[in-house]
Image (cartoon, rainbow, N blue to C red):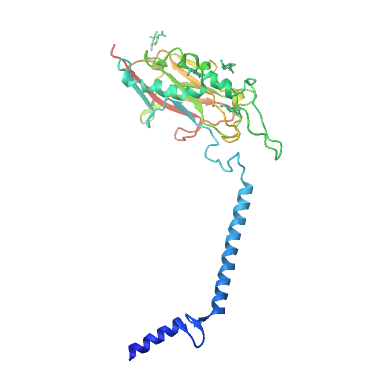
Amino acid sequence: MAKDGNKSEWKEFVWNPRTREFLGRTASSWGLIFLFYLVFYLFLAGLFALTMYIMLQTLDDHKPTWQDRLSTPGLVIRPHADETFEIVYTIQETESWDMFPRALDTFLTPYNDTLQAQKNNECTPDQYFLQEDSGDVKNNPKRSCQFNRTILDACSGLQDRSYGYQDGKPCIIIKLNRVIGLKPGKNGQAPSITCGAKKYKVGKDEWKDDADKIGELAYYPSSGTFNLMYYPYYGKKAQVNYSQPLVAIKFLNITVNEDVNIECKVHADNIPVGSERDKFAGRVSFKLRINSNN
Ligand SMILES: *[C@@H]1O[C@H](CO)[C@@H](O)[C@H](O)[C@H]1NC(C)=O
Ligand SMILES: *[C@@H]1O[C@H](CO)[C@@H](O)[C@H](O)[C@H]1NC(C)=O
Ligand SMILES: *[C@@H]1O[C@H](CO)[C@@H](O)[C@H](O)[C@H]1NC(C)=O
Ligand SMILES: *[C@@H]1O[C@H](CO)[C@@H](O)[C@H](O)[C@H]1NC(C)=O
């Protein structure tokens, strides 16, 4: 009996024909609840859309709103040294170095003279190539200046396919990380690269360097500079065909069978050369060791 009573109670709860209640509520009560939630969610969705719309209005398609990390441009070398920044090979073992010229070939493909002439402008050297927007009127797309591979001369890989690796006179190519809007250099002085011996610690308060092993260096272009016409950079979307300027360094007479620690720095009045631990400082260091069986 009790069981039957429970059952009919339950049934009555689901649908009570007397009071016409479904799950304890009348149709109008249910209706009000649905109406309430409908309005509530519509309101939330509207609020979300409005916030999103306002946010997007403040974003510029052509310029990142935040770029704190790279306000100081870092230097990067090619070929990619591994994590330890070491380029170590043996002249007589082709397979120990042939990945370097191959990497440089790939890296320099976009600098092909013909390609550069097709895509980019011949700019007036030694001055910034300014293409500012006038107020809200965007001056896009922005043109870029030609950087021909042939500028790198003996390090262009065009005459010497091995970039000097084969005869123990290797080339290293250096570029400055892109920083939007940066006008490096001051008073018409282009930023320049110099490489030399890196000082390293050999004991407490004892420092050493490999200055006597580096030998003579050649720079391409010979000034070792990044011409001002390649700046400022306006960003990937605004300046579609931009080619970063390069400086190549060739080690003409480096001592073989020895570790040589090298450091390259950028010199420009307004690029701080930070501490060694600062990844984005205007310097890069690496170890070069060329082994020779002769
Ligand atoms: C540069 O590009 C042109 C045409 O695209 C091609 O004929 C030439 O071989 C390329 N030069 C090099 C060095 O890759
Ligand atoms: C780059 O090379 C092309 C093709 O040889 C040439 O027409 C152009 O003047 C060169 N550009 C510069 C800036 O030297
Ligand atoms: C970019 O390069 C392409 C050819 O690859 C050219 O048609 C286009 O006009 C260039 N755009 C700009 C803005 O320089
Ligand atoms: C290369 O450097 C060594 C010392 O490291 C020096 O004795 C030699 O004369 C140099 N050769 C040339 C061609 O500069």
Up-down relation of residue 271 to residue 123 (above or below): below
The residue positioned 60% from the left and 56% from the top of the image is 49
State the residue in front, 128 or 162: 162
Asked whether the viewer can see residue 154, the reply is yes
The residue positioned 67% from the left and 37% from the top of the image is 138
Residue 166 x %, y % = 36, 14
Up-down relation of residue 7 to residue 180 (above or below): below
- Quarter in which the N terminus is drawn: bottom left
Residue 144 x %, y % = 60, 26
Asked whether the viewer can see residue 197, the reply is no
- Judge left or right: residue 25 versus residue 95: right
Residue 18 x %, y % = 50, 88
> Residue 206's quadrant in the figure?
top left
Q: Please tell me how many numbered marks the rendered image carries.
A: 0
Give the farthest residue toward the front: 17
State the residue in front, 27 or 89: 27
